[in-house]
Amino acid sequence: MILVTGANGNLGSATLAALRARGIAATGGSRTPGEGMRRLDFDDHAGLDLTGVSTLVLVSAGYAEDDQVVERHAAVLDAAVRDGVGHVVYTSLTTAGDHLGFAAAHRATERLVRATGLPWTILRNGLYAELFGGLLMWNEDGVESPFGDGALAAVAREDLADAAAAVAASPAGHSGRVHDLVGTPITAGQVADRLGVPHRVIGLGEYRRRLLEAPGLLPFQPPMLASIATGVRHGFLDGTAPDLTDLLGRPARDPLATAVAVASATRPKARVDSRTAR
């Protein structure tokens, strides 16, 4: 049986759906499981149960500080060893992202995966096209960003889910391999052009100030997002590789179209003229 962790999250649920679309028996694990899922709370170490799992797709539990993320992953991997899981597929971060503010937890987890002694595959996922589009900020005239003219080799989340499903369906052929799953480079200017609006570049200091003042962000998030901005701006995240299309067996979805759709969805509605509204 294949089990996908984080099955209520965006990547986990999409991976589970991709497996089922292939006609492959798979289940999900979550701290709040739906019908037919297995309860998996990474913070409840004693309650982790992976019995009967042949392939574990470990979707990174990255929504926390690094020490908590690595501790959670270590607990799951310990359970995988104890319960006899046959293969571990871990969704990591693109190789080009080594300098990013959240890379250390991924690389530490990769070490733990290798140290289990279980057959493993590491999927080094590129940054989502959905994230890139969502990070553009609307102003009165158009969009603004800290990305400058830099490009991101972005990937549609659904393609990463399809790639994970392809590996989980036939893991033996990917044992001991690291796949770098990056897409076609896109820029904020290209997104703005598709939207038909101007793109204004803001400085990294201004961006960091906005992040620190933004309501709702957790303490680890402003430095994480700032590191993405400087990485894109200075050309560290625009490299391509064939691994994604090789796994998909088809062309990847257009990341520019995906980013444009997300940015468009956040576009403020036009103000209603108070005189015409009477």
Image (cartoon, rainbow, N blue to C red):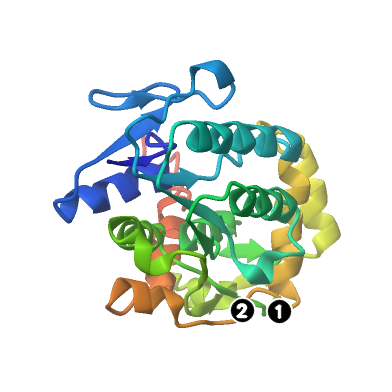
CA gap between label 2 and label 1 equals 6 Å
Residue at position x 54%, y 82% in the image: 240
**In the image as oriented, which residue stretches furthest toward the left?**
23
List the residue tagged with mark 1: 235
Using the rendered image of the protein, determine whether residue 253 is visible from the camera's viewpoint: no
Residue at position x 38%, y 58% in the image: 164
Residue 101 in which image quadrant: bottom right
Residue at position x 66%, y 63% in the image: 145
In the displayed structure, 72 sits above or below 21; it is above
- In front here: 188 or 245? 245
Answer few, some or many: residues within 10 Å of disc 1's Cα (few below 14, many 20 plus, some between 14 and 19). Answer: some
List the residue tagged with mark 2: 238
Q: Residue 247's spot in the image, x, y percent?
A: 35, 72
Q: Residue 52's spot in the image, x, y percent?
A: 32, 33
Report helix, strand or loop for mark 1. loop
Q: Residue 26's spot in the image, x, y percent?
A: 25, 42
- In front here: 164 or 102? 164
From the viewer's perspective, tell me whether residue 164 is left or right of residue 113. left
- In front here: 203 or 124? 124
Type of amino acid at the residue the image marks with label 2: Asp
Report helix, strand or loop for mark 2. loop
How many tags in the picture? 2
Answer few, some or many: residues within 10 Å of disc 2's Cα (few below 14, many 20 plus, some between 14 and 19). Answer: many
Residue 76 in which image quadrant: top right
Q: Residue 175's spot in the image, x, y percent?
A: 45, 64
Residue at position x 72%, y 73% in the image: 233
Using the rendered image of the protein, determine whether residue 26 is visible from the camera's viewpoint: yes
